[in-house]
Image: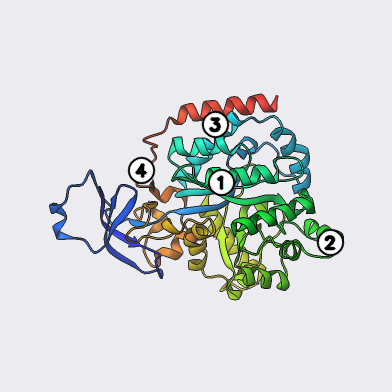
Amino acid sequence: MIRFFNGKILTLKENFDIFDGEVWVDGDKITYVGKNRDDHTDFTFDKEIDLNGNLLMPSFKNAHTHSAMVFGRSFSDDLPLQEWLYDKIFPMETLLCGDDIYKLSKVAFLEYLTSGISACFDMYYFPENMAKASVDTGFRTVMCGAVNNFKESVPLLEEYYNKYNNYNELISYKLGFHAEYTTDKSIMKNIAKLAEKYQAPVFMHSSETMSETQECIHQYNKTPTELFEKLGLFNYGGGAFHSVWVNEDDLEIYKKHGVWAVINSASNCKLASGVAPVETMIKEGINLAIGTDGASSNNALDMFREMYLTCALQKIKNKDASSTDANEVLKMATVGSARCMGLYDCDCIDNGKKADLIVIDMNRPNMQPIHNITKNLVYSGSKDNIKLTMINGKILYENGVFPTLDIEKIYTEANEVVKRITQ
């Protein structure tokens, strides 16, 4: 067992209250959450961690990313989305093999860990290699189908769905496809049949750019959201990555079907895609989560930057400094993202929940003096504040060190891949 004691505890179970106490972890589960206990000497602990007044809280979950796309970090910057995607990224992707995905994804995992991220919702190819990379490193991954006109198929999507939902406790799989503009209507219809067969949610990129949305309206006389609803893709819920160019009718569809709007503020800023109407979504009771998108378009995989931008951009968009409470954004990056990904067993700190935890260093200058800890995480927090990241009861990052991972080997192998595909 591992005992965290003498710290501040933010459970996010019901609210944003913080108390002084301790948390015990036995195997992969949390077994005690409460005040500091005098009888702890009656128990045997493998490790006791004195938090020294630091904050223990649920880890962040990255609700939309393409982990292996670290290959494109700073390779094709300062380009519009379509040119970046079709002229730069797609040609490089054709050169990737499964082993490349295995090696590249590990770099992303390292970065996630330094940002307090314990799980990612990954949409990419070669799922066997992604799953193996996750299991070998101890990282939690929910994989999402990436079917389009060029890669994979609906039968393969069903095969993946059944295989990777029975693969390993760290791995799960959701139905999905790339986007409306890369996927024929006939394919989307067949994915909707799969959703009906398994009564399962479906996820996709949606309404990311103005041109994408306008072209969909021109072709189908419907927004992407309206098209997906008509095809039955949202009958069992699901999620729309980006959700920037959505209107009132789209949000009614989100609300009706419990669709998750997954916000990717940094990527949308860098590609000039726009700013999602998060404040309106909050007021409308839309399910909200946060993702980083891939390092090819972001370029960082940093949840602190995502939270700050998500909050600050709403104030600019709405011309109102009181717009979008920082606590709501913190909830999006933790509880919201976890539930979007189907990770209901590690969405908060509670007895019986999975031990996916992080420790925030309160003794850094950006955390002092202490007024409001939760809002400080959003407005002045940074990766520098992550002291520890635990996944499934195992410490994978602590005080700047990855105790179970050979980072030099990971970097070397990733750079070898990039050298090959860029030459």
Q: Dot 1 lies on which element? A: helix
Distance between mark 1 and mark 3 Cα atoms: 25 Å
Query: At numbered mark 4, what does the secondary structure look like: helix, strand or loop?
Result: strand
Label 4, label 3: how far apart the Cα atoms are: 21 Å
Residue hosting label 2: 220
Q: Which of marks 3 and 2 is in front?
A: 2
Looking at the image, tell me whether mark 4 or mark 3 is earlier in sequence order: 3
Dividing the picture into quadrants, the one containing residue 91 is: top right
Which of the image's four quarters has the C terminus? top right
Q: Nearest to the eye among marks 1 and 3: give it.
A: 1
Residue with the mark numbered 4: 395
- Dot 3 or dot 2: first in sequence order is 3
**Mark 1 vs 2: CB contact within 8 A:** no
* Residue identifier under label 1: 162
Estimate the spatial distance between the alpha carbons at disc 2 and disc 4, rounded to whole Å: 50 Å
Could you tell me which residue is drawn at 62 percent across and 53 percent down? 266
Crowding at dot 3, Cα within 10 Å, few <14 / some 14-19 / many 20+, comes out as many
Q: Residue 413, position in %: x, y?
A: 54, 26
Eyeballing the image, is 166 above or below 242?
Answer: above
Q: Which amino acid does label 4 sit on?
A: Ile
Q: Is residue 366 left or right of residue 221?
A: left
